[in-house]
Structure formats: C-alpha cells, structure tokens
Amino acid sequence: MTKTELSRTPRIGSFAGELPVLGAVLAALGLVLLFYSDDSFTLNTLAGTFLFAGLATSWNIIGGFGGQFSLGHSVFFAIGAYMTGNLFLKYELSPWISLLPAMALAAAVAMLISWPVFRLRGPFFSIATLALTEVAMALAVYFSTWTGGAQGFSVPFKRGLENMIFAERMNNALLMLGYVAVTLLIVCWLRHSRLGYSLQAIRDNEDTAEAAGIAVLRTKLIGMGLSAALMAAGGSLYMMYVRVVDPYALFSLFDVGVKVAMITLIGGIGTIYGPLLGTLLLIPLENLLRAELGASVPGGNLLVLGVLLVLTALYLRRGIIGSLIGLADRMKAARA
Amino acid sequence: MSTTQQTVPMLEVRGLSTGYGNIPVLHDVSFEVPQGKVTAVIGANGAGKTTLLSTIAGLIPATSGQLMLDGTDISRTPAASRTAAGLALVPEGGRLFPFMTVRENLELGAYSLGRDAGMRQRIAEICEIFPVLAERQSQMAGHLSGGERQMCAVARAMMSRPRLLMLDEPSVGLSPLMTERLLSTISDLAASEALTVVIVEQRVTEVLAMAELAHMLDHGRIMKSGTAGEFRTDRMIQETYMGR
C-alpha cells in the first residue's frame, strides 16, 4: 500500500460513523413503545428497563471501557435521587434543573473517593467500592434530614412535564428512552475520542498506557467522573419516576451496584451496545423468573441469574456483543 | 570540558538504584548512551535488565540516582511526560492493547503528539516500514501472530518520533528467522531516523552483531562495558552467554 493510498483510507471508526447505527437502535426501541402504547403494564416495565439500560451504559464508561470494575455505582445513583428529591420537596425545584447539581456532586464525590482508591488495582479496587457502598448507606440512614432515615421519603404526585411526573405511562417510557439515547450518544463519542482511547488502553495494560504517554490517574478520574455524573442523572429520573426512595433500595447491591456490572458483563463489557442488550435480555427474564419462581423457590431468580453469569464468564468472556465482534475479527483475519 | 552538541550523550544514567519494596534490584548503575548508536544490554535472567528499562521509562521509581535525557534531567518527570520528551519503550512481549485495533494501537503510540494530519502522515510512514501492519490495520491487535505483534509494538513506539528507543527482549517468542528480520528492521530504523537505541536481549550473538556498544548487567550491577566488537571476542562473554 502506498502512502497516498493510505492517507485516503477512511478512519476505521468515527463518531459520525456510529450515528446511523445509534439512530436505528433508538428507532427500534421507539417502535416497541408504539407497539405497546395501549398496554400500561408493559410500558411500565419498558420504562424501568430503559432506565436500567441507561444506568448500565453509564457504568460501562469506567467499568467496561476503563476496566475499573466498580461495584459502588449505587452511591452516585443515590446522590442523584437524594439531590433531586430534596430540591423538589424543599424548593419545588424542577428535576430538569436539579439534574445538574446532582451530576456535578456525583462527579465530585466520585473523583474525590477514587483519587485514593485508584491506587488499588483489580479485585482490590472492586472490594474498596463495595465497602464504599456500605459506608454510604450507613451515612444515608444517619443523616435523616436529607434522606428520611431508614424509612426514606416520598415526593407528592404533582403532574407535569416540568416535574417529570406523568399520569400516562407512555411519557415515563419516552423520558427513559431519552436517557438511554443521551448515554448511548455520549458513549458513541467516547469510543472514538482521546479520552475513550486512553481509558481502553488503561484497561488493556496500565503500564504500557503510561509508557505511551497517557496520564493514567487523571484519565481514570475523568472517566469515573463522567460515569458517576450520568449515573446520578439516572438517579434523578428514578426519584421522580417512583417518587418514593429509601436507602435500602437505592444502595441495594443486587438491584443497582452489582446488577449494572453483571448485566454489562453478559451483554458485552466495553462495547457500545452491550449494556443495552444485556438489560433488554435480563430485566424481562428476571421479572418472569420472579413471577414464576418467586413463590415456590424464593431467591430462585437470583440463582438462575448467577448461573448465567458464570456461564458468560466461562464461555463468552467479553459478553454477547464482545464475543460477536471478536468472532468477526477472527474471520477477517482468516481471510487476510 | 567541552559541552558541544555532539558530546552530550542521548542518555546518561548516574548512580541509579532501585528495587521492589525492600528488595534492591539495581545497585548504583551508571552508563552513557551516545547519540545515534545502538547500545545492547546483556545479562542473565534476573540480572535487572527489565527493571533498568522500566526505571528509565519512569514506570518504576528510582530510589536514588539521576537520569539525563539529551542533557535534561528527567529523574523527576512522570512516565507519561517522558514519552513527550522523546523516550519510547517497547516492553517485553510487546504488550499491545489486545482489544483495540492495530490502527488504534498505533494512534495511541502518538498520543503525546495529538491526533491530526501529522498523525495520519506518521501512520503512513510507519506502514511503509511495516507493510504487514497496513494490511491488518482494522484488526484487533490480540489476533496478530507473534511476529506481527512485536512489529506492531515497535511501530507503536516509533509513532511518537522518539529520539531514544528502548526495546526489552524483542525476540521473545519469535523464530530465529523472525528475530533476524525484526532486528534488521530496527537497525534500518536507527539508521534512517537518526535514532538512538537501547536494546536488552538474551540472544546475545544476534544483538552483538547489530549493536555498536554493549554493557553486561549482573545482579543489578554493570560488570563490563565496551564496544560490541570487544564483547564478541571476549572469552568470558562467549562462554557465559554465547554458548561457545
């Protein structure tokens, strides 16, 4: 290949190149909503599923692309919920506005905590983030002025777009679809940005990344801040969606902290659409299992999910989408 | 003492000591790497060769000593900034970013230069030196063969237009033929890009054939320094490292 040929070769991936796929994915999700537009039960499930897809996509920024396996993201989720809930209760501030301080505070807390914790690698980092969740939950129970203590608190049902409180389930689902769209758009940009490259390089090999001129700690902190901010935005939406929160729900490992990581692992860690696919497959499956097994085998749904996770770790190490990408690459290599 | 451009060594290591925790590895290591020459560092397993390169690259903090790159003290410079200062390391085994494409690996090598037309130009230049990488640009680096992987690692290091290239056992896992090809590519690079090279190798015969200067590291100390020619004819070196 000559020099001129090479310089004409288009860049292999680019943000603009991701947009058609993103558009198609979002359109497909929109069509699903339209299909179920008369079924408020399904719309409700979809709203929850989309919220979770956005949360998992946010986690994937630092957990998947950056390779920092945080299990403490529920803390940032809770910060979003508490900030929005309090500002709404005490000052009637619209959640559209309180989103911003919620994201800023989550990013600040994330970076402050991560600064010492990022000196730990691998499982030690994960354990530290687990401990963080427990500490944060204890603090939330203690500082009852803002959190309502162990009982939690609720916000009144005041309908209106400005409050993100709707009577029609369709509007809730659309709002959550918007959240998925924003997080996916950011990840599409990230995948081909300087920050995204650096995060992936750090995930693949921290020492080599440093030798290649990447400021490792700073990159990890920025990635963590971005991930936490988007997680907090999800927390804000959750607050106005369920309108009642308590520490045990917000800081739940099985419902938030560990679940975002687990779903991303199964769907495809470090890929753009892995978290979305994982959520679309697992949240409905989990609901089904809970309904079918909940009465006869309590906790049976967790058992099935655990087995799925082990199988993924054994046979699909990069999750469903990651394994498909790897397969395509090997076929490309075989042809070359 | 004359301090003209020619006499300033590309790298000067003065009294360098380092270790892992309480275990010392390098003891008061001093040597100079002259501009534009290939310098080989040989030594047995555990002699401290990898530690030496990692310390120069800034990945391991030195406990004492000084590092001068082209007359500038870089002892306190963080690893990431040493790349921008003109230093590049090809770590042992290449250490590519396996889940990123070959192209992305190359782009990351030029990270300190920014991502603009200059980078595209540089990729084109690099792909002329390593044609196989041009063909494999869009493939994940983890799916390259051993030889291609090592080529890609050298190419990645060359992306930042380093003045000093350090290679840690580039021949590990390669066939003799592949090793020969890789070492001759490195020689060509050194000649065409006015590059200074420090190469750590276990294949002593091959590396002494391409290097101009050599140092022998043993138990964390420089035990012998000289020209590659002197090393090739040294009885002790022949018996210990070249199996004659």
Image: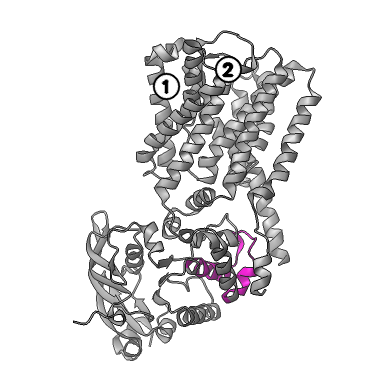
Residue shown at the point (71%, 61%) measured from the top left: A332
Whether residue A45 can be seen here: yes
Residue A99 rendering spot, x and y as whole percentages: 52, 25
Name the residue tied to disc 2.
A240
Residue shown at the point (64%, 41%) measured from the top left: A274
Secondary element at image label 2: helix
Which of A104 and B64 lies nearest the eye of the viewer?
A104
Lower position in the chain sequence, tag 2 or tag 1: 1
Choose top left, top right, bottom left or bottom right for residue B27.
Answer: bottom left
Residue A28 rendering spot, x and y as whole percentages: 76, 35
Whether residue A311 can be seen here: no
Q: Is residue B138 magenta?
A: yes
Q: Is residue B203 magenta?
A: no
Residue shown at the point (46%, 30%) measured from the top left: A104
Name the residue tied to disc 1.
A137
Q: Amino acid at mark 1?
A: Met
Q: Amino acid at mark 2?
A: Met
Residue range in magenta is B129-157
Which of A106 and B174 lies nearest the eye of the viewer?
A106
Looking at this view, name the residue that lies furthest to the left. B1
Mark 1 residue crowding within 10 angstroms, few (<14) / some (14–19) / many (20+): many
Quarter the N terminus of chain A occupies: bottom right
Quarter the C terminus of chain A occupies: bottom right
Q: Is residue B4 left or right of residue A179?
A: left
